[in-house]
Image (cartoon, rainbow, N blue to C red):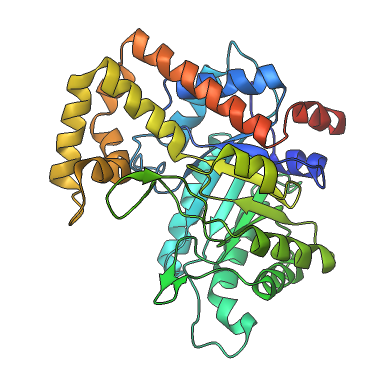
Amino acid sequence: MSPVSSKIIFNALLDKNLIVLACNPRIIPGVATGIFLAAKDLDAAIIMELARSECDEKGGYTGLTPLTLSARLIEANSKIKHDIWALHADHIGIKTGDDDEIEATKKLIDMQVEAGYTSFAIDASHLFDFDGKTVKDELKPNLDATIKIARYIAAKKGDGNFGLEVEVGEIGRTNENGMILTRPEEAVTFINELEEAGVKPDVLAIANGSTHGNVYDKNGNIIAQVCIDIERTKAIAKALRDAGFKVRIAQHGITGTPLDLIREKFPKGDILKGNVATLFQNIVFDCIKIHQPGLYERMTDWVMENKPLPDKGKEEIFGKNGKFAIKQFFNEIYLMDEECRKDIEQKSYQEARNFIEAFNAVNSAALVRKSL
């Protein structure tokens, strides 16, 4: 079944005590089927997404283009027939904001619209004027790029029915004092300026302490991610509500976050979209390691040779940079044996269920259907 607009999903679930699971199936076999099955069984609205770096006209680092991603997801869902899901262009990164980059971004969006995408995330958070005298001055480069691309997206469909995510505060950016977090006044100023320009986003990604990918300690051991600043997140959400905006938070970098922390501490409703990405990649790599150790060894050797990290151990290097091996070994991965694929599907199904339940999103699809 074809995807629906995430705007429909977000509007239907606005102020409900839940989070919509946004999954990154950067390796399709087994993963997509498992996620769709979990969403169907729990009747949950979900989002499927890949970032620009992962999926572009050249295949990003996953070997998938917008068209092949869309086709493979629809194929994975063809027998399951889960009806409430969106196809989201995550992190449409804009690093310079110059004319060439803006035009290249528009061409990518053309491809994504043609492929059936129903949702877009503009990420110009890297553009920040540290010499700006006011918050608005600091955010102006981000605002300029975001407005240009948002208007282009809206013009692609007359009813403006695409979902829209924007970003303020670069996720993972640090300075000598540690992680740089988004301030409530930045979020309010950013959304206010966008709405003044006629751009009305549904969700806002913020820098609140999370990081993308696996997290390791100083000894190279993978550890839980417990650095998300819950109080800062609540403060930003409250500031947006108090200012009268119907914009909620998109929480990035959830892989590794304990489910108990999510159940007990995540401000559901304030956070409306929750991204889980690297977890599903980890499942695939772990299953390949068990079922096809020769392929896993070749992938590891390639990463160690082509994507080394100074002073890091083998496990950490592969855990952080194994994603770059996906495109290099695309055919072998996609021709994995049936036992491996079924193991991936089963594990992806269980993890998707775990997050849908922790996000309090069971039966959220029924709420969306009522709004259609």
Is residue 129 visible from the viewing direction of this image? yes
User: Residue 296: horizontal and vertical position, in percent?
Assistant: 22, 26
Quadrant of residue 196 in the image?
bottom right
From the viewer's side, name the closer residue of 32 and 181.
181
Q: Is 363 left, or right, of 71 in this rendering? A: right
Which residue is at the far bottom? Answer: 133
Which residue occupies 48% across, 39% down?
Answer: 277
Residue 112 appears at what percent x and percent y?
Answer: 52, 41
Q: Position of residue 334 (x, y in %)?
A: 33, 21
x 39%, y 34%: residue: 64
Residue 45 is drawn in which quadrant?
A: top right
Hey, which quadrant is residue 1 in on the image? top right
| Number of numbered labels in the structure image | 0
In percent of width and height, residue 152 lies at 61, 57
Residue 94 vs residue 168, the one in the foreground? 168
Tell me if I can see residue 113 in this picture: no
Nearest to the observer: residue 66 or residue 93? 93
Q: Residue at x 58, y 64 (%)?
A: 146
Q: Is residue 76 left or right of residue 198?
A: left
Query: Looking at the image, is 338 positioned above or below residue 155?
Result: above
